[in-house]
Amino acid sequence: MAEPGPVHSAALPTVLPTVLIVGGGFGGLRAARALAGAPVRVVLVDRQNHHLFQPLLYQVASATLSPADIAAPIRHVLRTQGNAEVVLAEVASVDLEARQVQLREGAPLAYDFLILAAGSRSSYFGRDAWAELAPGLKTLDDALEMRRRFLLTFERAEQEEDPEIRREWLTFVIVGGGPTGVELAGTLKEMARLSLPREFRRIRTDRARVILVEAGPCILANFGSGLSEKAVQGLERIGVEVRLGQPITAIDARAVELGGERIPTRTVLWAAGVSAVPLGAGLGAPLDRLGRVVVEPDLSLAGHPEVFVVGDLAAFAHGPEGPLPGVAPVAIQQGAAAAANLLATLAGRPRRVFRYRDKGSMATLGRGKAVAHIGRLSFTGYPAWLAWLFIHLMLLVDFRSRVFVFFEWLWAYLTTQPRARLILGKRDLRS
C-alpha cells in the first residue's frame, strides 16, 4: 500500500485576515499581544525598533536610568508570538479605500483590519521655533539631548569666570506642570543638590535654580486641588521654584520671558503639551484641537469599521469620563479593547463600547516623595513613592528591565549617585 503523500499547503486554510498595527507603543503593543493565538496575521509597523516605556523617560533625561533600562526591541517582545511580524518603517499615509498604508520607503502594506496607534509629539502651540531652544521629551533621542544639555551646563559653569553668566548656566527652566514636568523638576533639583556637589570645585551645584513654569492655575491638574497643593509644597521643600498662571511668552538663547519678567537661563526644557502625529489628519475624519482623531464608541473610525484608532492618536469623548487623557493606561486598555472588538467581528459577535477604568494617577516629587490618587484614596510622601515604584516596575514590558531598573533605583537611593551620567553626542552648547 502506498504511503500517504505530504499534505500540500493549498489544502489548508492559509489565507488569514491581516491585522496591520501602526505603532509599537503601549496601545499598539497591547493590541498585538492580545491577538496572540488568534486566527489572524499580525503585522506591527514602527519607525523605531523598540518599545519605549515613556513614563520613565524623564529618568533617562535626568541621568538616573540608561536608555536600555526602559526600552526593549519589539522583535524580542513578540519573538514567541507565531502569528506576529514586525516591519521597521515609517508610515506616510493611509489609503482607506484601497485598505493600504503607504510607507516613506518600500511597497505599500495591505490590511483587512487596521489599528492606528501612532502616538503623539511635543506641541509648542504654534511656536515651533522654540523646539530648538527648548527640547521636548517624547523619544529616547529627546531624553539623551536633555541629559546632554543638563550635564554640560555644569561643565560650562565650572569654567565660567563671569558670575552673572555662571548664574545663567546654573538656572534651569522647565515648562509644563503635568507629571513629566513635575517629575523632571524634582529629579533635576535633587541631582544638583545631592549627587553633584562633591564633584565640582568652583561652583555650588546645590545652589542651581530649577524653575517649574505652569500657565494654568495649578500643577498636576488631573490630581485634584489637594494633591496639587501638596505637590507644590513638596517641590518647594527641596528648592524648586514653582510659577503658576504665568505662560511663557518668549524664549531665546539667553533667557525666557514670563509676561514682563525676563529670567536669564541657558537651559529650557519643554514638558508643556503634546499633539497627535500628522498621520491622523490624512484620514478625512473629524479632529479635536490636539489633532486627535474622533473615534466611535467602539474605537473605530466613522464609516470604516475595519479601522481602529487608539492611544494618543484617538479622541474618545464618549461616556461620563469625557475626553480621555493621553496616558499609558488609556492606550493599554484601548489597545486590548480594539483587539477584542476586531475578534468579535470575525466571530460574528457584536462589538462592545469601550469603557475606561481609571486606576489612579501618581507622580514623584523627588527621593522618597510622591503624590498618588488611586480610587477614592489620596496619599503622599513615602507610601505614595513606594506605590509609584512598584506600579512602574510591574508595567515595564519585560523581566530584564524590571530587574535592572530596580537595582539602579536601589543604588541611587542608597548612594544618591545615579550611574548614567554620561554626556553623549556633541559637546558644544549655546554660547
Image (spheres, helix red, strand yellow):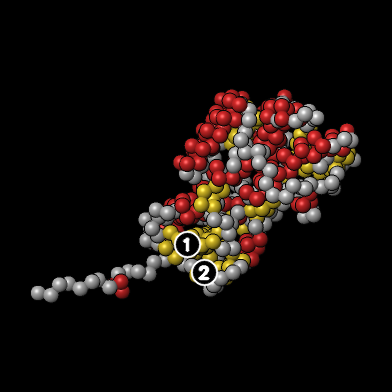
Seen in the image, is 294 located left or right of residue 129? Answer: left
Q: Are marks 1 and 2 in contact (CB under 8 Å)?
A: yes
Give the image location of residue 305, x and y in percent.
Answer: 50, 63
In the picture, the quarter occupied by the N terminus is bottom left
Give the image location of residue 36, x and y in percent.
Answer: 40, 54
Seen in the image, is 146 located left or right of residue 368? Answer: right
* Residue depicted at 38% across the width and 69% down the height: 15
* Residue depicted at 82% across the width and 37% down the height: 159
* Residue depicted at 55% across the width and 29% down the height: 410
Disc 1 packing (10 Å; few <14; some 14–19; many ≥20):
many
Disc 2 packing (10 Å; few <14; some 14–19; many ≥20):
some
Task: Using the image, determine if residue 106 lies above or below residue 130.
Answer: below
Which secondary structure, mark 2? Answer: strand
Q: Say whether residue 145 is visible.
A: yes
Number of numbered discs: 2
The label shown at residue 406 is none
Q: Amino acid at mark 2?
A: Leu
Which secondary structure, mark 1? Answer: strand
Seen in the image, is 193 located left or right of residue 364? Answer: right
Q: Say whether residue 378 is visible.
A: no
Q: Which residue is mark 1?
A: 43
Residue 106, quarter of picture: bottom right
Q: How far apart are the alpha carbons under marks 1 and 2?
A: 9 Å
Give the image location of residue 77, x and y in percent.
Answer: 46, 51
Give the image location of residue 48, x and y in percent.
Answer: 57, 56
Q: Which residue is mark 2?
A: 109
Task: Using the image, determine if residue 30 lies above or below residue 164.
Answer: below
Which of marks 2 and 1 precedes in the sequence? Answer: 1
Q: Amino acid at mark 1?
A: Val
- Residue 220 vs residue 132, the one in the foreground: 132
* Residue depicted at 49% across the width and 45% down the height: 397
